[in-house]
Image (cartoon, rainbow, N blue to C red):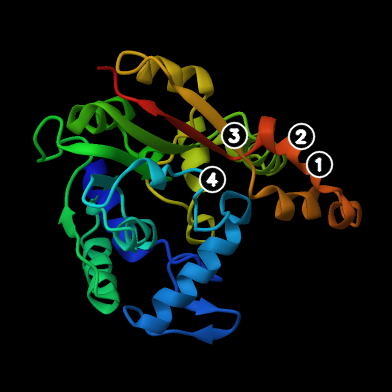
Amino acid sequence: MNIKQDIQDWWARHPMTYSDTHGRTEFGGENYEIGTLAFFERLDQEFYSWNKPLHDKRPFDRLFPYDQYSAGSCVLEIGCGLGTMAMNWALRGMEIKAVDLSPFAVDQTKKRFELYGLKGEIRLEDANQLSFRDSDFDYSYSWGVLHHSPNLEKSISEMMRVTKPGGGFGIMLYNRRSLMHRYMTEYIEGFLHYEKRFLNPLELASRYADGAREEGNPYTWPVTSKEINRILNPFCDDVKIRILGTELDGLFRILLPGLGLILPKWAKKVWARRFGWSFWAYGHKRM
């Protein structure tokens, strides 16, 4: 079994389109032709709507330190998907280099950049063995990708290797202690539906993370904050971790029928900051 090939093949067949069904191009009953400007615009609209609390004046500017980097700064994205985040850095004049294990993702991100008239270098790369030189990048990041790596420590080590001393980084990883994983995956699917009888914890997490309707993806292993700190501490002194719970609006409607629709924002934030589905780990590489 070649897990890398399985991961590559699965994501080529099921790209992260943020559509009504994972990997498809239908949004609200309307189909879009993949690779067109209309498709990218509709995908971005959906993706941004999933992450409203992370935007202020610009998409994701409550996470990304855009203003700390001048035009021409070299930025790396590991796992570019269909190019939404890479595009936002390019629009700010950064020298963006984006990589992905999926040839389909690389092709689509290149099409996006062509359609928007943007400059960037998009490459087919394995996060466990990047081809870039040491200390090439002012800022490096990865959004929702590296928990799909069977060797997370190696992937993060490679990210830090190619980041300049003093350079910034950001990594989004799924949270194994989240309400989404504990309740929806471990309790509902694992316990109530008896799936833990024939699936080990990794298989269960992979089955009910991205692509659950398609029987899951080959590899997803959410992490804990303790594990993140252990992996990052050899590289930096200022690791900070935020827990993001942008998925909780939908989850509360399932857990608290009726009440979930009127739950005040402050109450949701309390849960999100402790039991959200995603970690955002960030800081600077040690000088």
Q: CA distance from mark 3 to mark 2?
A: 11 Å
Task: Give the image location of residue 119, x and y in percent.
Answer: 20, 65
**Label 3 crowd (10 A; few <14 / some 14-19 / many >=20):** many
Q: CA distance from mark 3 to mark 4?
A: 13 Å
Question: Tag 1, which secondary structure?
Answer: helix
**Which residue is labeled 3 in the image?**
243
Q: Which of pointers 1 and 3 indicates the residue nearer the eye?
A: 1
Quadrant location of the C terminus in the rendered image: top left
Check the image and report above or below for 132 versus 104: above
**Label 1 crowd (10 A; few <14 / some 14-19 / many >=20):** few
Q: Earlier in the sequence, mark 3 or mark 4?
A: 4
Mark 2 touches mark 1? (CB < 8 Å): yes
Q: Is residue 200 visible?
A: no
Question: Tag 2, which secondary structure?
Answer: helix
Mark 4 touches mark 2? (CB < 8 Å): no
Identify which residue is drawn at 91% across, 57% down.
258
Residue type at mark 3 is Ile
Image quadrant where residue 81 sits:
bottom left
Q: Earlier in the sequence, mark 1 or mark 3?
A: 3
Identify which residue is drawn at 59% across, 84% down.
29
- Classify residue 188 as left or right of residue 253: left
**Which residue is labeled 2 in the image?**
270
Mark 1 touches mark 3? (CB < 8 Å): no
Mark 4 touches mark 1? (CB < 8 Å): no
Q: Which of pointers 4 and 1 indicates the residue nearer the eye?
A: 4
Identify which residue is drawn at 70% across, 42% down.
188
Residue type at mark 2 is Val
**Which residue is labeled 1 in the image?**
266
Q: Which mark is residue 62?
A: 4
Q: CA distance from mark 1 to mark 3?
A: 15 Å
